[in-house]
């Protein structure tokens, strides 16, 4: 069975200049578990050297998990504009 990384290699992205995910870093300060670091299959969330959360929307596969599981309600999420975002080949 293919790994998640191998599966992600099969998708194509058309990058929208406007981010479809916005994270309120102030709300992240009160989040101790940082589940986004583990539940995002595309690893769009990383911890920075200041202890805050950085996110990168370009590789997002639009699964919506961060919106559902961010208990701090820090994530604002919408689909990328038409024609942009992830394109699945299979
Ligand atoms: S789970 Fe939500 S509130 Fe917690 S660090 Fe991630 S984005 Fe921020
Ligand atoms: S929608 Fe899915 S792939 Fe995109 S950032 Fe959220 S958890 Fe990661």
Image (cartoon, helix red, strand yellow):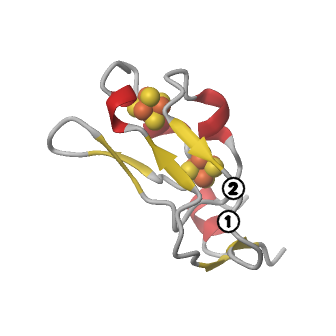
For the point 61% across and 74% down, the residue is: 9
Pointer 2 residue Cβ closer than 8 Å to ligand 2: yes
Local crowd at mark 2 within 10 Å, few (<14), some, or many (≥20)? some
Could you tell me residue 60's position as x and y percent?
Answer: 59, 60
Q: Which residue is mark 2?
A: 62
Q: Is residue 63 left or right of residue 33?
A: right
Could you tell me residue 81's position as x and y percent?
Answer: 70, 70
Question: Which residue is nearer to you in this view: 4 or 36?
Answer: 36
Q: Nearer the viewer, mark 1 or mark 2?
A: 1
**Mark earlier in primary sequence (1, 2):** 2
Question: Which residue is nearer to you in this view: 3 or 49?
Answer: 49
Quadrant in the rendering for residue 90: bottom right
For the point 66% across and 60% down, the residue is: 61
For the point 38% across and 21% down, the residue is: 31
Helix, strand or loop under label 1: loop
Q: Is residue 53 above or below residue 43?
A: above
Q: Is residue 69 above or below residue 59?
A: above
Label ID, residue 80 = 1
Instruction: Say if residue 35 shows up in the picture.
Output: no
For the point 40% across and 21% down, the residue is: 33
Could you tell me residue 2's position as x and y percent?
Answer: 69, 62
Q: Is residue 2 left or right of residue 25?
A: right
Label ID, residue 37 = none
């Amino acid at each position: 069975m293919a790994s998640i990384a191998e599966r992600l290699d099969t998708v194509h992205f058309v990058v929208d200049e406007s981010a479809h995910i916005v994270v309120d870093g102030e709300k992240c300060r009160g989040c101790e578990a940082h589940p986004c670091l583990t539940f995002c299959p595309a690893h769009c969330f990383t911890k920075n050297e200041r202890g805050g959360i950085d996110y990168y929307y370009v590789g997002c596969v639009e699964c919506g998990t961060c919106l559902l599981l961010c208990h701090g309600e820090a994530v604002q999420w919408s689909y990328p504009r038409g024609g942009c975002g992830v394109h699945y080949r299979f």
